[in-house]
Each structure stands twice: as structure tokens, then as C-alpha cells.
Image (cartoon, grey):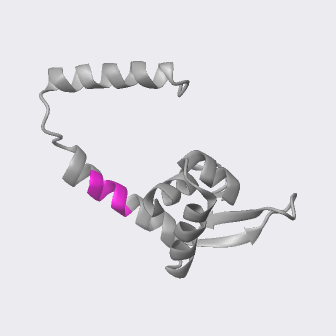
């Protein structure tokens, strides 16, 4: 959840998202979002800020250290996990085709 939270923030336009949006996009209970953000904040990877337009909402913003770690971990994951997933090229093509159809049917695209 912490990696996914960092990546959502990393790819967001402003580098910040409301807590409620994080929960919705991660599809987890708000308590889980709070726990992940607490840990990321304690590590100096995100900060909480008051929402400028909605006093009831809190924004979570990625720090430069969080952005750097997100990029580093992603590169490591790509190198160690995704470079050779153990499928032949034709099996990988079939898998991607099935997953694309599944995501399209689920309204993901």
C-alpha cells in the first residue's frame, strides 16, 4: 500500500491528492490509507497539508525524497521482477490480451 500510495502521488499532476481520493484509487478502507500515510510521513516521504479549497479534506503530498525513492524502487522492481516474468513472448501476448479484455469489461479503460 505504501508503494502504491507513493506511485499515485508521483504520477499525479500536482504531486498531491486528497486522502479520500487515495482510498478510492487504492480501493482500500480509509483506515488503511491513514496507516500507509502515517508510515510514509514518518519516513519523510510525504507530508500532509490542509486542502486549500475544502477545510474538511487533507492533501497528501509527495516529498522530493519520496519521489526519488519511488523512482528507485520502480527501477529495481522492473529489473528484478518484470524483466523476465517467466513467460514466453507468445504466452505474454496472450496474457496481456486477456487482461486488457478483462479491464475493458470492468470499465478500467
Residue 6 percent across, percent down from the top left: 50, 60
Q: Is residue 91 left or right of residue 10?
A: left
- Residue at figure coordinates x 49%, y 19% from the top left: 105
- Residue 104 to residue 70: above or below: above
Q: Residue at x 41, y 59 (%)?
A: 71
Asked if residue 42 lies in the magenta stretch, the reply is no
**Compared to 31, does 86 lie above or below?**
above
In the figure, residue 90 lies in which quadrant? Answer: top left
- Percent from the top left, x then y, of residue 101? 41, 18
> 70 or 109, which is in the foreground?
109
Q: Is residue 59 above or below residue 90?
A: below
Residue 12 seen in render? yes
Image coordinates for residue 73, horizontal then vertical, percent: 35, 61
Secondary structure mostly seen in the magenta stretch: helix
- Horizontal relation, residue 104 to residue 19: left or right: left
Q: Can residue 63 be spotted in the picture?
A: no
**Where are the magenta residues, as a range?**
72-77
52, above or below 86, in the image: below
Task: Using residue 82 as the reference point, say whether residue 24 is left or right of it.
Answer: right
Quadrant location of residue 19? bottom right
Q: Nearer the viewer, residue 64 or 83?
A: 83
The quadrant of the rendering that contains the C terminus is top right
Q: Nearer the viewer, residue 34 or 5?
A: 34
Amino acid at each position: 500500500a505504501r508503494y502504491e500510495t507513493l506511485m499515485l502521488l508521483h504520477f499525479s499532476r500536482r504531486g498531491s491528492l486528497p486522502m479520500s481520493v487515495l482510498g478510492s484509487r487504492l480501493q482500500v478502507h480509509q483506515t488503511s490509507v491513514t496507516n500507509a500515510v502515517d508510515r510514509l510521513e514518518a519516513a519523510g516521504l510525504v507530508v500532509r497539508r490542509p486542502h486549500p479549497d475544502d477545510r474538511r479534506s487533507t492533501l497528501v503530498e509527495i516529498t522530493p525524497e519520496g519521489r526519488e525513492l519511488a523512482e528507485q524502487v520502480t527501477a529495481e522492481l522492473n529489473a528484478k521482477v518484470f524483466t523476465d516474468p517467466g513467460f514466453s513472448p507468445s504466452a505474454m501476448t496472450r496474457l496481456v490480451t486477456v487482461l486488457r479484455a478483462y479491464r475493458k469489461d470492468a470499465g478500467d479503460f
